[in-house]
Image (cartoon, rainbow, N blue to C red):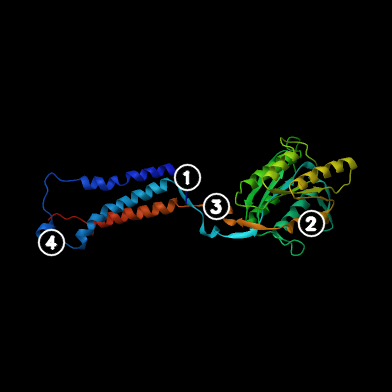
Amino acid sequence: MQFEYPAALLLLLLVPLVLLRRRGRGGAVTFPGIREFEPARVGWRQRSMRYLPWLRVGTLALLVFAMAGPRARAPKGRRTSEGVAIEIVIDRSASMAKADMPYGGVEMRRIEVVKRISREFIFGNGHELDGRPQDLIGVIGFAADPVALAPLTLVHDALRPAIDKLQTAEGLKDDGTAIGDALAFAAEKLHALTKTPGKVIVLITDGENNLGVRTPRQAALMAKEWGIKICAISIRPDAGDVLYEQAISAEMQMLGGSTHGIARMARDTAALKAVYQEIDRMGQTQIDESEAIESEGLLVSCLLVALLLLVLEVALRETWWRKVPA
């Protein structure tokens, strides 16, 4: 049980004053009650009238409880499942728009192939990839800046539109390859899951870091400190300058090697799918599924019960416990 405004619970100390106030009431002249004259006729109704103020106390207590903002986790989330937490970090710089990767016999843009294979990794394709139904998965897109397209979740249907809407950067201001910032952003998201031991970042990019505040090495140190593996995938369909490719390969090797992850280069769709298969075979650990389930508010329930007690008090005061002058 959690409270958004726990200080409001201090008002519960004032609730007993309702009973004290009622007990302190008295008329100017005290008359003997019916008990003194006809003790045999004093029944359960007369004796039970002393409990009427407790209905008001219960109503006020529930209203204070509601003011404190009670929240409880859904019981259906209290189970564990085998899996890991994975952030899929996809490069959306302008170079990812090059149409030089075949998929199903058709040359497609790099980003479209990455999106399709990533969906197959998450949901399975019936043969090479089985899907990851028991993993917490989030999606981050980056160019000049990283953007969380979908938070870490077990509700994977929410990932489909997030991946579908991913598009390459447009304009010089939005373009760039801030690998260090994207990895640091993903690492911080995973680090927030304190009860999830297995954490993986899947980085897919076709270039090297050329922008951002943090360097890839700084981001790798963060991930290593927090026990996060980086699986770095370099998309290189067009074999270009040897020195440039060696620099990219060294950067990827540093990311994967320093975090006990992997570093691979994918020159075509088959190679990219093979890397995803390799990641798919990575070991699984226990995660608490309740972390992905949003808390349920109890405010409405408290207010409804308080209203019910108030109605019950008024009804009993005007009927069963009504005081009729003799």
Q: Are marks 2 and 1 in contact (CB under 8 Å)?
A: no
Sequence-wise, the earlier of marks 3 and 2 is 2
Sequence-wise, the earlier of marks 4 and 1 is 1
Q: Tag on residue 26?
A: none
Where does residue 178 sit, x and y in percent of width and height? 74, 39
- The Cα–Cα distance between marks 3 and 2, rounded to whole angstroms, is 33 Å
Residue pointed to by mark 1: 4
Q: Tag on residue 39?
A: 4
- The Cα–Cα distance between marks 3 and 4, rounded to whole angstroms, is 59 Å
- The Cα–Cα distance between marks 4 and 2, rounded to whole angstroms, is 90 Å
Residue 173, placed above or below residue 132: above
Q: Is residue 227 left or right of residue 9?
A: right
User: Which SS class for mark 3?
Assistant: loop
Q: Quick one: quadrant of the C terminus?
A: bottom left
Q: Are marks 3 and 4 in contact (CB under 8 Å)?
A: no
The crowd level at tag 2 (other Cα within 10 Å; few <14, some 14-19, many 20+) is many
289 or 197: which is nearer to us? Answer: 197
Type of amino acid under label 4 = Pro
Q: Are marks 4 and 1 in contact (CB under 8 Å)?
A: no
Classify residue 84 by image quadrant: bottom right
Q: Is residue 244 left or right of residue 175?
A: right
Q: Residue furthest left?
A: 37
238 or 288: which is nearer to us? Answer: 288
Sequence-wise, the earlier of marks 4 and 2 is 4
Type of amino acid under label 3 = Glu
Residue pointed to by mark 2: 273
Where does residue 175 sit, x and y in percent of width and height? 75, 38
The crowd level at tag 3 (other Cα within 10 Å; few <14, some 14-19, many 20+) is few
Q: Tag on residue 294?
A: 3
Sequence-wise, the earlier of marks 1 and 3 is 1
- Mark 4 or 2: the one toward you: 4
Residue 251, placed above or below residue 48: above
